[in-house]
Amino acid sequence: MHMIQVVFMTVMVFFVIVTIHEWGHFYFAKRAGILVREFAIGFGPKLFSIKRGETRYTLRLVPAGGFVRMAGEDPELVEVQTGQTVAVRVKDGVVTRIYLDRLDERSNVVRGEVETIDIERKLKLALNADGVIESFDIHPQALMISKGKETQIAPLDRQFGSKTVGQRALAIVAGPVMNFILAFALFAAYFQMAGVPMENPDKLLIGDIVAGMPASKADIKVGDVIDSINGIKIGADSEKMIGIISKSVNVPLTFTVIRDGKPLTSKITPKKDPDTGVGKLGISAAIPSRPVSFGETFTYAGKAMKNMTILIFGGFKKILIGDFKMDDLGGPLRTAQVTSQIAEQGFTQLTSWVAVLSLYLGIFNLLPVPALDGSRLLFLGLEAVRGRPVDPNRESMVHFIGFAMLMLLMLAVTYNDILRLVRGEH
């Protein structure tokens, strides 16, 4: 695959799995009537921003996730104080815009001191304009303008915290659930494209070729049928193939494959493996596959989900008990590196890898770690049990600390990724 294509596919992998996750939050928040202020992919400075309807869609610099910012989740508006001078634009007796600065530059507005204002419950505003008290209704989608920035007001019934526990939980859990749905769909697509290994194969195929190893310099390709080595037929016996190669360190082998029905022979010399001392060519054998039926597609996709989930939790367990090294951890750079390597193998293998990443993202976000979806669900569970919410300030502090710790971990693994790249490790 061409390098530009590889880079494009790598970027698209990140974009797809994060976007589908955030879309889950976005869709169910909107269904609950919550005002979604921003739908962001990435963190940090904005690279691209466009507003459609009530929501601003942004692409940010740091490709380490994304977020959906809902009204009421954090301080959003500059407070309007009694006695403060503002200007309002009125249409049909209803305030549509509230200007907090540069008042002399505003045209077609009513200017005055605020007597009373309620932008959450009653949506009412009273202004003292040259000694005359004027009362206005405030439009539920009115905009507040300050320092060149427009912010839509959020009446109480449009805020995240005003919704039922069930509605809020659904808006939160929908992100990981969308990742699970995507993972299942991609696993199903993978099995439709790749099939499954035959039960009683009569031959072996070249499954993978390692770059830089002896086989990568020979005229063999992934998918070739492995016919013979030094005239010895291999058939479906992978152990026989491994045995011949292992015993032939620095001894040239006549390696014959079948491609498009024609035999092709190459001289390949196994390289000594520094860890085991046996000969290696840098190939792996694969069992021929067969197509899957429509029903089998769902069965195999479900099994793949189950097996990968077990492996993912096995990795989490090692981290919890400390059974890992720093080099075992990888961040966005290592993920991008592995993704690019898999993208070079073709669209079929990339589909399977994206399914794994989507499944991992969904599971990871459900962990009860502060700042993740799992932690937010835990707080909602406590609210359901107690009959009242946890102090928002305390909850926000927990999430803030958790987010800071995650960012520190991200910096650490990214630094580790950079060192690995500098050392030329994979």
Image (cartoon, grey):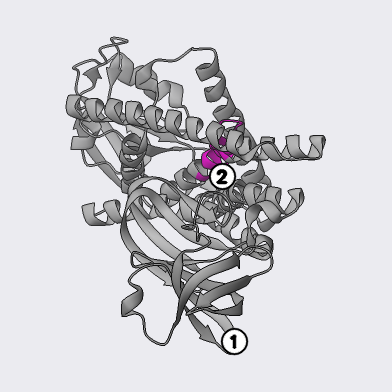
Residue marked by disc 2: 196
Residue located at (34% from left, 19% from top): 244
Quarter of image, res 209:
top left
Residue located at (55% from left, 31% from top): 398
Horizontal arrangement in the rendering, residue 74 relative to residue 118 (left or right):
left
Residues 8 and 158: in front is: 158
What range is drawn magenta here?
358-372
Residue located at (49% from left, 58% from top): 77
* Separation of residues labelled 1 and 2 (CA atoms): 68 Å
Horizontal arrangement in the rendering, residue 380 relative to residue 128 (left or right):
right
Mark 1 vs 2, N-terminal side: 1
Contact between labelled residues 2 and 1, with CB atoms less than 8 Å apart: no
Q: Badge 1: how crowded within 10 Å, few (<14), some, or many (20+)? A: few
Which element carries disc 1, helix, strand or loop?
A: loop
Residue marked by disc 1: 93
| Residue type of the residue flagged with mark 2 | Val
